[in-house]
Image: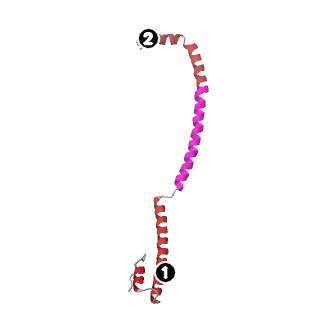
Amino acid sequence: MLDQNDLKQIGTLIKENNKELTKEIVLQVGEFITDRVLPQIDELADNLVEVKKDLTEVKKTVTTLPDKDHLDRVAADVKGTIVAKLRTEDDKVNLLIKFLKESKVLTEEQWKALRALQVFPTVEI
């Protein structure tokens, strides 16, 4: 490892040759930056533009997705529609069973067995 004396000697050498070294170093650093660093920065900038476009598309997609409340409302509406249709069908079947019993097509046991299979039980008064 370098001690203080070594560093001072190096500093003296650099000061003596400072003008020539500075011009050469500046040229080399400038070439390096132009050849290696700037193209990489340009590529990064292009990539960032693409990433920004992609994020904008993702944001549009996320904002158009339905939320849980909306899905719950839709599911409840569908359930209500299905229940209403099932009630109508159940009423028709119950009415048909009643007509068949009144026409004496069904025996009392058959009528009771069919009534036991109701989807929505009814209370007869």
The percent coordinates of residue 41 (x first, y second) are: 58, 32
Give yes or no for contact between labels 1 and 2 (Cβ–Cβ under 8 Å): no
Indicate the position of residue 24 as horizontal and vertical percent values. 59, 16
Check the image and report above or below for 29 versus 3: below
Between 101 and 93, the one nearer to me in the picture? 101
Task: Tell me the amino acid under the disc marked 1.
Answer: Lys
* Relative height, residue 27 to residue 102 (above, below): above
Check if residue 30 falls in the magenta segment: no
Instruction: Kindly state the secondary structure of the residue where label 1 is placed.
Output: helix
Magenta span main SS: helix
| Label 1 to label 2: alpha-carbon separation | 106 Å
Residue 86, x across and y down, in percent: 47, 74
Residue 92 badge = 1
Callout 1 crowding tier (Cα within 10 Å): few <14, some 14–19, many ≥20: few
Q: Is residue 93 above or below residue 60?
A: below
Magenta-span inclusion, residue 46: yes
What residue lies at 47% left-to-right and 69% top-to-bottom? 79
Q: Which amino acid does label 2 sit on?
A: Asp
The residue positioned 42% from the left and 86% from the top of the image is: 107
Tag 2, which secondary structure? helix
Residue 6's disc is 2
**In the image, which is nearer the foreground, mark 1 or mark 2?**
1
Q: Which residue is drawn at 49% across and 74% down?
A: 85
Mark 2 neighbour density, 10 Å: few (under 14) some (14–19) many (20 or more):
few
Image quarter hosting the C terminus: bottom left
The residue that appears at 55% across and 52% down in the rendered structure is 60
Q: Magenta stretch?
A: 35-64
> Quadrant location of the N terminus?
top left
40 or 101, nearer to the observer: 101
Residue sitting nearer the eye, 33 or 67:
67
